[in-house]
Structure formats: C-alpha cells, structure tokens
Amino acid sequence: MIVTNVLLGVLPVVFVVGTSVLLGRVSAAVAAGTASAEWSAMATAFLAASAAFSVQQALAPVQNALGELVARRIDGRIFDRLIAAALRGPGIGPLEDQRLLSHLSEAGSELEQGVHSPGRACAGLLHLITRSVQLAGYVAVIGLAFSWWAGLGLLVAVMAFRYGLRRGLRAYAEVFPRLAAERRESRYLRGLAMDATAAKEIRVFGLMKWLLARYRKVYLGWIMPVWRERRRLLLWPYLRYTVFGLLVTMAVLASVAAAGARGATLTSLALVCQAVLNGLRLGEFYPEADMQTLLGMNAFRAARDFEQGVAEHLAAEPAAPRGQLAEAPVPRGEIRFDGVSFRYPGRERPVFDDLRLRLPAGKCTAIVGLNGAGKTTLVKLLTRLYEPDTGMITVDGADVRSFAVDAWRARVAVVFQDFNRYEVSAADNIGFGAAPHAGDREEIRVAAKDAGVLDVLEALPQGLDTPLVRHVTGGTDLSGGQWQRVALARALFRLRHGGGILVLDEPTASLDVRAEARFFDEFIRLTSGATTILISHRFSTVRHADHIVVLADGRVGEAGSHEELLRDGGRYADLFRLQAARFTEHRASEAPAGARSGGGQVIP
Ligand code: ADP
C-alpha cells in the first residue's frame, strides 16, 4: 500500500515533466525529420509520459483495492477486540454500565457501517502519502525549472490552506459526539420502524404517523446542525481558497509570460504552468482521506474506552479469593448466603444488606417478593455474574469463590426471566444447555419432553432441526410460552449433565393459567433430587415448594413452609390470600356456568 501510494505520488510528476519536455522538443524534431536524433528524443519523452500515465491509470484501482483491504483488516481486528472485551471477565457489570454501553454501541455501529471507521482512517492516512509526494514533486519541479522562491510560495500556500481546512474539519468532527444522543435516538426509531416484533403494536396503536413524524424531527434535529457547521466550516473556506487560487494562477501565468518574453524555454514554461496548477489543487479537501482520518478515530476511541472500562470494572471487583478448584460439588447439605451485602455499582441503595438465606440441597425453595425486592439479583449473585460486596455464598460450607467460575457454573442450570432465543435449530437451542453433549439427540428429546415441548418441536417442518428463526427460509418462530419451555428444556438438559442446581426466574410468566398449574404439578416430579430455586412474584403459585422465603427490604422477611407461613399470618399470608382470591375470581369468571363452584381449581 505504501509503495503504491508513493508511486501514485511520483507518476503525475513524471507525466508533467514528460509532457513538458515533449512540448519543448516538438519543433526541433519536426524540423529534423523522423529519422533524426531529435525525433527519437521527442519520442522518448512521449513514451515516458505515456508510460507514467498508463501505469497511473492501472495503479489507481490497485490503490483502492489495497485501501479497502487495509480498512477491512483493521476494522475486523478492532471488532475482534471489541467482541473480546464484551465477552471478557466472569461478571456482567461492564454490560450493565450505561457509560460503557454507550461506548460499545458507538464503536459497534461505526465499525458495522464502515464509513468513518478506524480502518478507513488508516487507509486515508496512507492515501495522504500520494498527495504529499505529489506536492514535494511539484515544488521541486518549480524550484528547478523556475525559482525556489516560487516553489516555496506554492508549498506555504498549500500548507496554510490545508491547515485551515483541517482545523475547520476538526471542529466539524466534534459536532458528531455532541449529537450522540440524537443520533442514537434516530437509529432507534429507524430500527423500530423496521422491526417485525414492534410492527404489531405500531399498527394496532396507530403509531405509524407518530413514528414518521418523530423520526423526521429527531433526524433533522441532528442533521441540520451538521449541515450548518458544514457550510460554515467547509463552504466559505473553499470559496476563499478558490479566489486565492485564481489570483495565484493569474500571477504565475503573468510571470511565466514575462519569463517567456525574456526567452525562457517552452519546456520550462510548460513545466511551471502544469506544476503550479496541479500543485494548487493539493490545497483542497481530500475526499479519500480527510473525513476518514478525523471521524474514524471516534470509533477507535470509543472501542478503547470500552476496553479500558471493562479492565477497570475487573480491577474494581471486590477482592475475592479467586479459587481455581476445577470441580465444584453437587450440593449435599445446603447452599447458604452468609451476611451477603450487595450494591450495584453507581447505585446508592444496596439491594441486599446482611442477607442470610438457606437453600436446602435436593429441595425446592421458592423465593418470593414484590417487584424490585432483589430476586433476580439473587440469581445473579448465585451464578457469580456479580460478586457480593461483603459476606459469602457457600455450598456445604465451602465458599463458592474457591471454585473456578466455570466449574461452579457447570453445576447451575438457569432459566432467566429474559432467557435467550438463539437463532439456531430447536435441537441446538436445547443442546446449548451442555455444549459438549449437544449432539446427544436422545437426551435432547427427553429434555424437550420433560419441558412439555417435544410434540410442538417434532411437528415443525424439519422437526428438531428446524431453525427457530422467522426470517430464514424454512425457519419458524414459536409462541412466548413455547419459547419458555424450550428455555426450560435447555436448563433440564444441563441438569441431566451434572447440573445439580436449577434456578427458575419467573418460569411461568408466559404460560397460561392451565399450563401454569400443570407446570407446577410436573415440576416437582421433574426436579426431584435437584436443588431447585423458584423465583416468583406470584405468591399464589409457589405453595408447592418445600421451603418459601419472602424477600423484603434487602433481607429475608419470612421463611418456612406454605402452611407455616399462613399460620404465622404475616406478609406472605396477606399477599397469598390477596393474589389467590384474585386468581379464584379469574378462574370462576373463565369457567362455564355450572362449573363455577370450584370444580377443577388448581389452587383453592
Ligand atoms: P426483582 O427481580 O425482585 O424484581 P431485581 O433484582 O431485578 O428485583 O432488582 C432489585 C433492585 O436492583 C431494583 O431496585 C432494581 O432497580 C435494581 N437493579 C436491578 N438491576 C440493576 C442494574 N443492572 N444496575 C443497577 N440497579 C439495578
């Protein structure tokens, strides 16, 4: 790339010299005839100019191709680094940090678009070699053929204008980060208009007009200041430079004419005219380099800030004994939260303050609490996506931090509330629960059957091999409840491959009332022997659990069996009765007449 750019800088200068010499030799060659030495000298100059021109034409596409290659390689490399940083570390703190997320989104979208990317900036920087070599060549030509003062004059004029232009462009480039929030919103609105999932609500609520108007407003809101700045920073300097260029050109032509009158050679006159005119053009805007070198580095800086932020997050994690024990045990006695306190970074209020909690092994413990009580945070701590600020989580007395994170996680199967819907086959969606066993079709079928979704998956066009992606030919999508069962099958698959601990965060949120009731009946059978943690904000659905813990104000408010808690008549009893009453009313109004007197009720 460097060699090509140097050559493309040298060749136009060679062409200018070649054509000027050619011009100077024409009259002597014509006078001496085609067989003369003068004719050959003219032909040599002609060949040199032609060769310079042809090679330049041939190299231009090579320069573009190499520039593209450089840009893609560099962008690819930075993308790799960004992905590596996003996947770095055992926790998810960096990906829940607003500041870092905005760096990640900025870098990711610029790299994806590849217009003002770091790769383009590097390719643009290399393209500057061509312009610099040309400028040096023209200055040398003017110096040698005419006057070094004139050469210096051209150099100073071009550099001064380039300096002014770059300063303007830099100010222009700074407009973009200032408008980052508006640009993000306009990206969001554009995505919303094209999103298949959002399409339903947008139509039903008649939001199309609003969406278009809002998009127009937000888009113009950031593009208009950009246009204004562009006019201020680029148009006026450009016009000023054009006027200056005209004046310089006129002065040069006048002085060349005067030199001609004094008897200067045609070659030197042609040389100076061409070198000055071509040289002056080098003071303009460079479309192949200027914006790229200025804006491309924004994405690089965002990527670097994200990487650094992730490293800082890792360094700031509570000093924990980082164990490397490669095997974590399946719990035999209990899992305990011992005086655990935890506060999200940047938040004032702790979610947990001296939390003491017992999860008996091989039993089902339900954790209930109102929204925001910290149920999901408890799962994040148990799965070591965050580490406690103080206190510890133990399994049969051993601090979970004494095990390698992966070893501990291999014991835990989770259905998160916002579980992933992988765009792969149904079988892989389940097999991901224990990747090394993902090829075990029989086990996958058993897990799917236990989760109650096997029939649905087998009825798909390609059975378990059907890609669960709507926008792929031959692919299909599932309903919310079916997806939840697939996620459950994934967790059960892990349980069958040495999991031992099963965590279900609001597992019935997408199931209908009947399916929910069935789910709990089957659930006890399916998970017998596993240490199960069932998270729910519905007090009326967890009564089958062996042990119920009510979270409130960052601590355990009450704990015991359903009967014990009802007997105690505390918060659980109140909320259970309230929610169960609503549930019964709902069921009664749903049932056909005659069946209203409680027949078939799941929860009395
Ligand atoms: P629950 O699952 O019981 O509804 P969560 O565990 O999700 O509650 O949240 C507990 C508290 O922590 C809430 O006040 C919530 O706003 C806060 N919270 C949850 N996630 C984060 C986060 N990533 N960063 C900061 N605060 C959070």
Image (tube, helix red, strand yellow):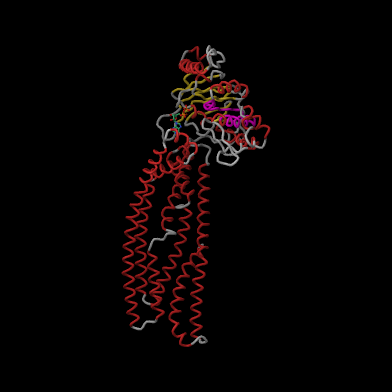
Residue 99 in the image: state x and y as whole percent: 42, 41
Front residue of 595 and 233: 595
Q: Residue at x 33, y 78 (%)?
A: 257
Residue 564, placed above or below residue 470:
above
Task: Compare residues 49 and 318 and report the one nearer the observer.
Answer: 49
Measuring 48% from the left and 58% from the top, which residue is drawn there? 123
Is residue 298 shown in magenta?
Answer: no
Percent position (x, y) of residue 155?
37, 68
Could you say which is closer to the camera, residue 489 or residue 311? 489
Res 403 → quadrant: top right
Q: Position of residue 459 (x, y in %)?
A: 63, 32
Front-lying residue, 182 or 362: 182
Name the residue located 52 percent from the left edge and 40 percent from the top edge. Answer: 89
Estimate the x, y position of residue 304 in percent, counting from the top left: 46, 47
287 left or right of 494?
left
Determine whether, in the image, residue 165 is placed left or right of residue 364. left
Q: Is residue 496 left or right of residue 226?
A: right
Give the residues drawn in magenta, as a range.
Answer: 484-511
Picture quadrant of ligand 1: top left
Tally of marks: 0
Write the residue at 34% across / 80% down.
Answer: 259
Name the quadrant containing residue 603: top right
